[in-house]
């Protein structure tokens, strides 16, 4: 179940990138395939059962570089009422994804069956572009992290390159003024249907303290005024949903 809708993704992923907003063509950023599964536990199943599934999934990767995280809604309003958690998985590129899926379908039936018995999930595939990478100094897997996700729409008559360019300029401003916030733009590829957004903007913080430090920096520097000035007329993002995340596995780095 976990990757059922991705059976034909490998060949189609390149086609999808060609059809994306002009961000992909105009500025040529690198994209990574990112799978997202919105999941609800089945009756009498809980996190302990899911952790056992993750062990089977990791064994089933066959050594292919892959990373996965679980997000649990924290401050999300009513947007995340229909599921219990989000599973995110990432590959370095489409070819690596294809090798992983080929191995999964062929050799990981135990993981697939255990997943189906434990959680019911709806799957999506995104093309992820890194705006600000995770600093090398961050300790991998050291406790929980916080992740905010917004839905963003490109202004009428503007291009994806212009919208992402504005976000990159704001990120450059943050970095120059002492705030490094890992930031990613996720463009929908498969599974979403008639999405009411052009891309998702994800920003990560090193746990609750990291989030709190960023909030203090943003208020002290009134960075929201700078952001609004840089993005006005180019892109508009809604109020972010905040989740607590944890790393499940990571052989990408």
Image (tube, helix red, strand yellow):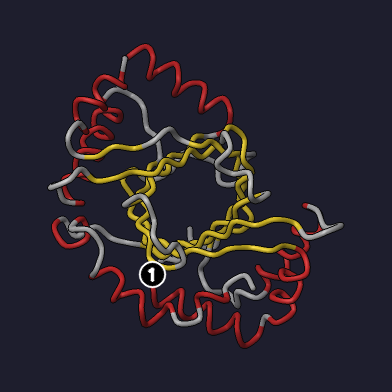
Question: Can residue 247 be seen here?
Answer: yes
Quadrant of the drawing holding the N terminus: bottom right
Q: Give the total of numbered labels.
A: 1
Q: Residues within 10 Å of mark 1 (few under 14, many from 20)?
A: some
**Image x and y of residue 235, in percent:** 24, 40
Residue visible at 44% across and 62% down in the picture = 192
Query: In this view of the protein, which residue sits in the foreground, 194 or 211?
Result: 194
Query: In this view of the protein, which residue sits in the foreground, 109 or 140?
Result: 109
Q: Which residue is mark 1?
A: 93
**Image x and y of residue 150, in percent:** 42, 40
Residue 53, by quadrant, is: bottom right
Asked if residue 107 is positioned above or below residue 124 in the image, the reply reads: below
- The residue furthest top is 220
**Image x and y of residue 18, in percent:** 23, 70
**Image x and y of residue 34, in percent:** 45, 61
Asked if residue 127 is positioned above or below residue 1 in the image, the reply reads: above
Residue visible at 36% across and 79% down in the picture = 12
Whether residue 61 sits left or right of residue 126 in the image: it is right
Residue 121, by quadrant, is: bottom right
Residue 209, by quadrant, is: top right
Asked which secondary structure carries label 1, the reply is: loop
């Amino acid at each position: 179940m976990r990757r059922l809708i991705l059976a034909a993704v490998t060949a189609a992923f390149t086609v999808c990138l060609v059809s994306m907003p002009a961000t992909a063509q105009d500025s040529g950023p690198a994209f990574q395939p990112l799978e997202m599964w919105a999941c609800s536990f089945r009756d009498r199943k809980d996190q302990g059962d899911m952790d056992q599934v993750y062990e089977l999934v990791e064994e089933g990767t066959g050594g292919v570089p892959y990373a996965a995280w679980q997000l649990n809604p924290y401050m999300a309003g009513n947007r995340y009422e229909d599921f219990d958690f989000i599973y995110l998985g990432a590959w370095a590129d489409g070819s690596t994804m294809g090798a992983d899926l080929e191995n999964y379908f062929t050799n990981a039936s135990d993981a697939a069956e255990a997943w189906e018995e434990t959680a019911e999930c709806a799957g999506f595939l995104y093309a992820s572009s890194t705006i600000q990478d995770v600093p090398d100094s961050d300790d991998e897997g050291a406790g929980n992290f916080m992740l905010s996700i917004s839905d963003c729409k490109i202004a009428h008559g503007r291009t994806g390159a212009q919208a992402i360019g504005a976000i990159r300029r704001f990120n450059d401003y943050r970095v120059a003024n002492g705030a490094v916030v890992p930031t990613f733009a996720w463009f929908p590829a498969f599974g979403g249907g008639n999405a009411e957004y052009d891309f998702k903007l994800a920003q990560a913080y090193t746990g609750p303290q990291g989030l709190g430090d960023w909030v203090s920096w943003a208020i002290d520097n009134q960075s929201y005024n700078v952001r609004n000035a840089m993005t006005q007329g180019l892109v508009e993002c809604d109020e972010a949903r905040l989740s607590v995340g944890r790393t499940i596995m990571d052989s990408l780095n």
